[in-house]
Amino acid sequence: MNISRQLVLLCVSVLVASAAWAHHSFAMFDLEKMVTVEGTVKEFQWTNPHCWLQVMVPDGKGGTQEWSFEMGAMGMLARTGWKSTTLKPNDKVTVIMNPLKSGAPSGRLLKVTLPDGRVMGPGGNAPPPPPAG
Amino acid sequence: MRLRASVCLLHGFAAMFLATVALAAEPDLAPGIPNIWGVWLGTNGADVDARYRSTPWPAPDFTEWGAAQSKLLMTPETPDECSPYGPVVYMGGGGFFPLEIARTWKGIVLLSEPASNPRRIFTDGRKHPEDLDPTWGGHSIGRWEGDTLVVDTIGANGRGRPLNGYLSGAVSSRVDTTPRLLVSDQLHLVERIRLVGGGQFLEDELTITDPKTYKHPFTVKHYWQRRPDLELLEYFCSDNRRPDAEGHTESAQ
């Protein structure tokens, strides 16, 4: 089973507080679980009210399963370093997420490791203003 | 030839007269008006001077109707998440999305990135219409009292997001049990907007009177930081409504 549920961590209240999203509650996610999933990008949807990352993940049976990861709004990503081209189809990624309680192959993205090693978040508050002068 | 020159001269005087009248009818262009123009970002969640942090929403003092409506907003039968903003939510002061304040012919326009509707504040001396039809944003008129823009708003349809429902989720949440602070079509909002912190912060003191929803008026202060480095982006909320179909809202479970 390559859907590697390596990290099942409790007490993620800090993450809950810091990653408040713009559009709906977290009630559908299992906020007490952080699951790591590795796969290949199928599509990065640069959209509102949320951006979505579609990843093909090995299912352990020789095939793949499509996972959906919800992120913040487009502007929230854009102001935290994302571009619409940050991820492309066939990019290898590692996603850490809160899975849906329902067990469906989907979750709330917390972090994603890009092919170049950068670790990006799901979008959030705009960064502080640049220093004066 | 002389006649043609005279006509041209008359046209010139007419143009100058009309321009003078136009400036006179545009009070926000008058000298001395504070520079509130440009892009601002709410200080909620930002590491700023404590003097410029928004005051929290008070404990609700609901009427019976208000309490019932607030409870309703915490169930799955919630308004459309992509509904436009009401006038109070517009001024919520959150740090996710910038707010832009611009001058127009008849007053001021506020643009909030995630709001589909601009918020207009007429500063041309008009009054609220007597036969006002309800709208999402209501009808706002403003006047300058020294360095403070005083804005009076009525006529909102009361169907916008709850005041604190934006960050905490306009839909039901088992995580966040904060009572939803809605406003009704009886809202009377008075705002006092002014520059503070050497012009680097904007203060909006909002007094909410809504006898249909709350037993008593209440006042909060929201703050924004001047952010010329930011730009408002496009936000078309119904572009990708996947959560409704895939269990990413509680109502869909």
Image (tube, grey):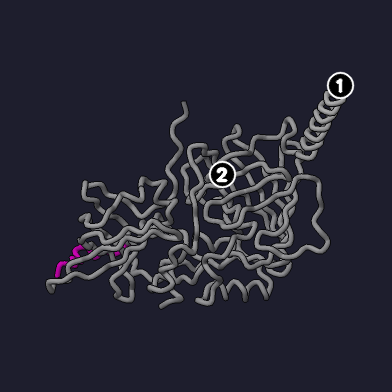
Amino acid beneath label 2 = Trp
Query: What kind of secondary structure does the magenta stretch mostly adopt?
Result: loop
Quarter of the image for residue B217 reads bottom right
The magenta-colored residue range is A1-11
Q: In this view, does B206 lie to the left or right of B234?
A: right
Locate residue B70 relative to residue B172 in the image: left or right: right
- Give the amino acid type for the residue marked by disc 1 in the picture: Arg
> What chain is tagged by disc 1?
B
For mark 1, what is the residue?
B2
**Residue at 49% in and 55% down:** B235
Measured from the top left, where is residue A44 in percent x and y? 32, 58
Query: Residue B40: percent from the left, percent from the top?
Result: 55, 43
Quick one: SS at disc 2? strand
Near-viewer residue (A105 or B195): A105
Q: In which quarter of the image is residue A7?
A: bottom left
User: Could you tell me which quadrant the N terminus of chain A lies in?
Assistant: bottom left
Q: Which mark is residue B224?
A: 2
- The answer to whether marks 2 and 1 sit on the same chain is yes
Residue B155: quadrant of the picture: bottom right
- Residue B97 horizontal/vertical position (percent): 50, 50
Q: Which chain carries label 2?
A: B
